[in-house]
Every structure is written in structure tokens, then in C-alpha cells.
Image: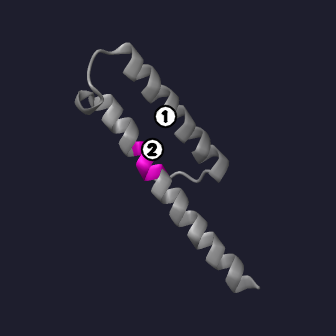
Amino acid sequence: MQLDLIDNQWRDIQFALCIALSHTEKNTNLNIEDHPLIKRYIKTYDQISEARKKEKINNSWKEVLNL
């Protein structure tokens, strides 16, 4: 599935993942490396970061080529 969101929306989702990660870590006694939900949060955060980075690079090339 692919979502068509603007960069601000992706950034907000990343921020929400950080908040969820923090709350999950505080409310459980498991180590970060042992908690499957925290692992998923981190993986999703990293995937969004990579996609945002690729999109910014792609958009910068489009701007240069249009000049």
C-alpha cells in the first residue's frame, strides 16, 4: 500500500511514533531490544525517514531540471 501524504504529514507521523515509543518504553518493564512493538515503531520510523529523504532528493532534481 502506498500513501500520498505531504512531507508535514509524514513528519507528524514520525513525531507520533516517537511519542508512542516513549510511552511504551516507560509503561513496560521490557528492555528496548526485547520489546516487539518498539522494534516495529523504530522500523516504521526508519522507513518513513528513508522515503522522505528519497522524495526530497527527487524533488530537488526536478527543481534543477525545470530551471
As helix, strand or loop, the secondary structure at mark 2 comes to helix
Q: Residue at x 63, y 70 (%)?
A: 59
Q: Residue at x 63, y 44 (%)?
A: 9
Q: Which residues are magenta?
A: 44-48
Say which of 51 and 31 sits in front.
31
At label 1, counting other C-alpha atoms closer than 10 Å, the crowd grade (few under 14, some 14-19, many 20 or more) is some
| Circle 1/circle 2 CB separation < 8 Å | yes
Say which of 33 and 46 sits in front.
33
Where is residue 41 shown, x and y percent of the image? Answer: 39, 36
Q: Residue at x 55, y 39 (%)?
A: 13
Structural distance between the alpha carbons of marks 1 and 2: 7 Å
Amino acid on which disc 1 is placed: Leu
Where is residue 1 shown, x and y percent of the image? Answer: 43, 51
Where is residue 24 shown, x and y percent of the image? Answer: 40, 21
Q: Is residue 45 magenta?
A: yes
- Residue 17 - label: 1
Where is residue 18 shown, x and y percent of the image? Answer: 49, 33
Residue identifier under label 2: 45
At label 2, counting other C-alpha atoms closer than 10 Å, the crowd grade (few under 14, some 14-19, many 20 or more) is some
As helix, strand or loop, the secondary structure at mark 1 comes to helix
Amino acid on which disc 2 is placed: Tyr
On screen, residue 5 above or below 19: below
- Residue 35 - label: none
On screen, residue 27 above or below 47: above
Q: Please name the predominant secondary structure of the magenta segment in the image.
A: helix
Q: How many marks are shown on the rendered structure?
A: 2
Q: Is residue 6 visible?
A: no
Q: Quadrant of the C terminus?
A: bottom right
Colour scheme of this structure image? one colour
Q: Residue at x 61, y 39 (%)?
A: 12
- Going from N to C along the chain, the mark reached first, 1 or 2, is 1
Q: Is residue 10 magenta?
A: no
